Amino acid sequence: MHGWKGRRLRLDLTNRTYEIEPLSVDYYKKWIGGRGFNSDVVYHETYQGMDPLDPESPLCFGSGPLAGTFAPLSGRTTVSCRSPMTCSNMDTGIHGHGDTNMGGAFGPFMKYAGFDQIIVKGKADKPVWVFIDDDKVSFRDASHLWGVGAKKATIKIQEELGDPDVKVSLIGPAGENLVRYACILNNFSSSGGRTGMGCVMGSKNLKAIAVRGTKPITIARPDEFAKLAWALRDKVHNSPSAIRRKAEGSMDLFDVGNAIGINAHRNASTGFMPGIEETYGGLQWAEQFLFRRKACWSCPVACGRYTLIKEGKYAGFSCGGPEMESVCNLGCRIDTYDVAAVNVLCGMVNDLGMDSVSAGAALSWTMEAFEKGYITEQDTGGIRLEWGDTETSMKVIEMIARREGFGDLLAEGNIRVAEKLGVGQDIVPHCRGLEHISVDPRITMGFSLGYAMSTRGSDHLKNYSCVEFPGCAKSRSYQVEEIFGPEGAKKFWEDFPKELNELDTKPVLCTWSEKNKCVADLVSCCCQAIGSWGGAGTWQEAYYPLLAAATGIDLTPEEVFQSAERVINIERAHWLRDGSGIQDDTHIDRYFDEGVHDGPFKGMVIDREKWAWAQQEYYKTHGWDELGFITEDKARELKIEDILPDMESGKKIIRQWLDSDKKAVTPMFVPTGLRK
Amino acid sequence: MTLRQEKVIVIDPSKCVGCHSCEMACAMKHFGVCHPHYSRIRIQEFREVNTFVPVTCQACEDAACIKVCPMNARIRLESGAVVTDEEKCIGCRACVYACPFGAPVIHPENGKTMSCDLCMDDELGPWCVKACTMQQALKFVDARDAARAKGRDFAAMLKEQNEPPHQDDADFSFSFSVE
Amino acid sequence: MKVVIVGNGIAGNEVASYLREHGPQADDVDITILSAERFPEYDPCSLPYFVGGEVDRDAVFRKDQDYYRNSRINLVLDNKAVSIDPEAREVRTEKGDVFGYDSLVLAHGGSLFIPPIPGIDLDGVFSCKVLAEADRLAGHQGTRAVVIGSGAIGIEAAEALKLKGYQVAIIELLDWIMPTLFCEGASRFLADEMRGYGIEVYTSEKVLEIQGRGSVESVKTDRREIPCDTVVVATGVVPGRPLAETAGIACERGILVNDRMLTSAADIYACGDCVQTFDAVSGEGCMYQLKHNAIEQARVAARNILGEEARYRGAYPFARAHYFDTHAVTFGKTLKGLERTCRPDQVGVIERDTDDGYLRLLLEDGKIVGGQAIGRFADHAGLFMGFMWRGVDMDDFKKNWRKIAELESVFPWQYRKAGQVLGLSALDAPDGMEMART
Ligand SMILES: Cc1cc2nc3c(=O)[nH]c(=O)nc-3n(C[C@H](O)[C@H](O)[C@H](O)COP(=O)(O)OP(=O)(O)OC[C@H]3O[C@@H](n4cnc5c(N)ncnc54)[C@H](O)[C@@H]3O)c2cc1C
Ligand code: SF4
Ligand code: SF4
Ligand code: SF4
């Protein structure tokens, strides 16, 4: 087998055993790569109503056929499981699919060890870490690593093994303490942040997985593969957006975002932050803090940063990162201009092992709740969080990771905090329990629909395409026709100037880019390279030829695209099985009622009627029914008929809720007519 | 001693971002597979301080590896590159131990050694250098210019570190040279 | 200018080719090499591998006849130099030829030390020092061999014979094998490895007699008798002094030279295994009969002949021990060597012993003066040789190995690497970068 390794590894922590499972070519054709294998396992090895922290719930690390090869941008790994963080708005006890995609080098090394996927099940009686040395697997005591931050723990493991080239995926204290939005990190600081994968790892008493792999990945057609890889590399080398990424990191989007006012300022209530010229932004950050850049495996761009604070209060502090979302969510979301403190916050959150978006959201929710008088020091054990208070924020972050005092509550994620306190539900900007990233959903409708429809709760990485931005649309005009077809493209250009704020084209756009990005995740390549900075083109140009040359299998682009659709559907089915459909594919009332506070799009809201229309349109582009459920025809077309009984039982749950008068956890817009 | 006219790969570790693209390129070029152990250039990782040092054969003017090889298997090619003649090599690793960089690496298939052959006369030039186009941690420059290139500061530093203190020869061969 | 070189070995050829490549353009350097053997230059180091069948016989040659012709080097084969007349500036050979010179280079190496053991001249007793002997050994058909002496050559010969299917035993007079190269611990480990490959190793044992009628039948030691049909003598190389002594050139253990490779006689240089020089690190007088030293000394001699002021920086011991899958390296002094010259309180040892390797560094006044490494540590031995050259203070190193000298420039990565290799924890020393608080 070429490209793939033909096997996956199953770890059973309860019994400290492992099993190597061979995989067939048919299986690979069906699921292609990392995210695909993971979503399949996570769907089929869990059940409706299962507790995400149930020891038997599988935690999967998956990588794709291009991971670890000479193909550029190919260092990514997907981690998936049933998420403890995300939930339905009907009931925070209803969970669904969760996954996260991390850079670094873990996936490539899994493959060098001979595995396309690692599935972890069970629960160790004591903290352990696992060492995978090619085919040898050992379970080792992790008591001395428990409570240790990501960087130090990684160093300790590497030193214990006497090998600085071992790749370690691990959790920080937050994961150990079951913070619902704990992340998994690999290669010191490349994190898979969202949806609480670290919490699940912690619940299994698994501190870390270290891999050493000595086996090469073979390529079906090496000469052709090398030529294609060079062509793509050349394209990236010469891409202005890649060059900008290199210089500024993902923060190259900061100024643009702020200029149009979408940067999730003040608990995502507004998006414009005046006077950031000296503080925020990619170049500013590089000038102030950049020590040296870092890259994922086999990536020529190196958008990753490593920062060192040279002077001032925090002089000497160093950390991997931060990237755009961390800075936005731990910076402008809590309304501070003290960028050195933001850098420290980002480093802390990472090292403690938490999702920086949800962590920032926890801080900003508390700040707004104080401001609005929803809560007082009595609720927080004497802590008061005001806008911009980075000192206290640092304290609170530690408390969350260690689940101390008020931190114990914040560790639950905003939706549960508001639910438990019985206040502030209206100011939790989320979809399916996952807080939005730093883009305001009232302005850019592509993001807006994407957040709601993403298969892992609010998220842009699953389905966002930049062509709704005027600048992007122009530089990628060739994509427009591909996405909308000739007719649609004509209409697109007619409405063009207003495109950003309109929902009309978004259902089609969203569905297309969902699959586009899914292919990137499947082959383990960077979705940003065909997304936000986009220098690599679309997946057909960038990744498909490499996939074909590496694996040598006879899959047409259409079939690959269909596999992507299958993966999206199985993830969606995971939610639907638990009853989460149309009522969760939406936003909190705030975004329909309260206009943007500031910036060029001041006053803008989402239009309810248009939203209801867009929801249905989106379902239609997928061939789903009006409740957003996968139809029998679709399931058969995608050869996932086995989900059909689950769809029926899922529908029962949603009907029951719609027919009852049970309130949603947070006030959210549900299209009229659905509920009695 | 006169400098050779050939081109050499110079290294600037301060620009290396640890992407290992160069390793992947080298493995691909010489073996058609992907794995760092199949590469002749190797990145030394000090990731805890985010520092990476590319190590590859510098084709020293006065190469220690050549002098210590019992089989005379370390040979200099027309291009100036110093490589292992696999027919003669017995895999004793004397060259690895004696090289100030530890540059020769173990051939993953036959246990002999291998080192950079500058990709012979591939029209793309050395693949590792091309793979580093964006970061410029590796450059392929004229040996004469190399003395001025930043990368050679690194080489000079190594030279100083690896040679006995009483040697004050100014040319930039930085191995165990007598001259 | 007429240059006569005695010895067509590593050093002699290096002098000749250096003169030809770097000398004046015209033919005014007239080069003659006098050789006691019948071959163009070959490498003694590769002989065991030819004997063992790992490489073809062709592979031992460094030069062919054409080279000498094309380089206009007058190679006189099979004609040993027997005396020198420094007054007349003449060398006389065994065949009675006389060669006049402007500069003379003595590069005739050493000869095998033949221990005074009864039976040493029996059929079936071989050595592995010169090609003619190696040819005989390679052609010999035996089944059971005893190697006398466990220096590097003995070990290599033992491996070669094992590869040829012999049953092999090594006998060492001293307490452990490769006694001048390795300290006891490393040596015992290496001996165990040898035994693991099926080679018998006997230490602290003295060979009393080689027995047999006409040809070898057994070797008798003070402890046992080993039946065998083959004996390889590898008991060391003695520097060739007699020729120099005919000219009244000062000798001690070897021919004495200054740092320009000049002997006590005018215009007579010497280099290679026959000379006694000084250690590059300590400056002590030494005789490391190793190829890289021969080459470096030869170049210094050649440059001085050409009128340059080249100075030798000193010789250094560096050797690898490699057989089957065992890889080891040694450099500088051993503990025994160190104890001969230092007070006990000056001596320090750093040791690492893991599943996959062994490392031992010997310190004098806190600075590395020698080291031995096996397995995974061997690949990093070069780092510590570098430290030895530079005289790095290891206490200082331990304190500062993580420090980033200047953030903008490349920090001395070799320090960090060495720290990794020595198993120092990155968590224990400051590096100018504070870690996240956890
Ligand atoms: C089996 C073996 C393995 C070795 N392995 C290693 C190793 O792995 N690493 C290492 O560094 N070193 C090794 N050595 C040592 C290395 O070979 C010598 O240090 C090196 O060859 C010395 O070079 P030289 O020119 O001084 O002497 P040689 O290479 O010995 O050359 C001397 C030449 O002079 C000739 N000669 C002698 N007397 C006269 C005379 N009177 N007139 C004319 N010619 C004469 C001899 O026939 C010979 O050809 C090994 C040696 C042997 C024998
Ligand atoms: S390609 Fe360049 S930046 Fe990447 S690891 Fe190699 S030398 Fe470093
Ligand atoms: S000593 Fe090392 S760097 Fe120099 S030529 Fe030999 S292998 Fe290359
Ligand atoms: S490993 Fe091969 S090339 Fe290197 S010194 Fe030994 S024989 Fe020569």
Image (cartoon, coloured by chain):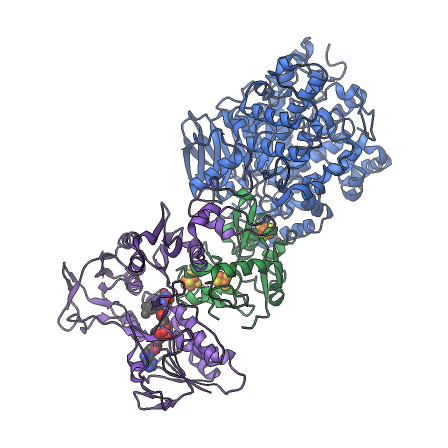
Quadrant containing the N terminus of chain B is bottom right
Q: In this view, does B49 lie above or below C225?
A: above
Q: Which of A396 and C310 is in front in this view?
A: C310
In the figure, the shade used to draw chain C is purple
Q: In this view, does A413 lie above or below C67?
A: above
Q: In this view, does A229 lie to the left or right of A613?
A: left
Left or right side of B2 for A519: right
Front-lying residue, B64 or B133:
B64
Would you say residue C218 is visible in this rendering? no
> Residue C6 placed where, x, y %?
36, 81
- Palette colour of chain A: blue
Q: Where is residue A547 in the image (x, y as percent from the top left)?
A: 61, 45
Q: Quadrant of residue A289?
A: top right
Residue C65: tell me if it is visible: yes
Residue A269, given in percent of the width and then of the height, sits at: 75, 24
Residue reaching furthest top? A661
Spot the residue most to the right: A494
Answer left or right for C43 relative to A430.
left
Q: Which of B111 and A20 is in front in this view?
A: B111
Q: In this view, does C35 lie above or below A432?
A: below
Q: Where is residue C80 in the image (x, y as percent from the top left)?
A: 32, 84
Total numbered labels: 0
Residue placed at 72% from the left, 12% from the top? Answer: A675
Query: Can you tell which quarter of the image residue A291 is in?
Result: top right
Q: Chain B is drawn in which colour?
A: green
Give left or right: position of C157 versus A592.
left
The picture quadrant where one finds residue C372 is bottom left
- Give above or below for A257 relative to C49: above
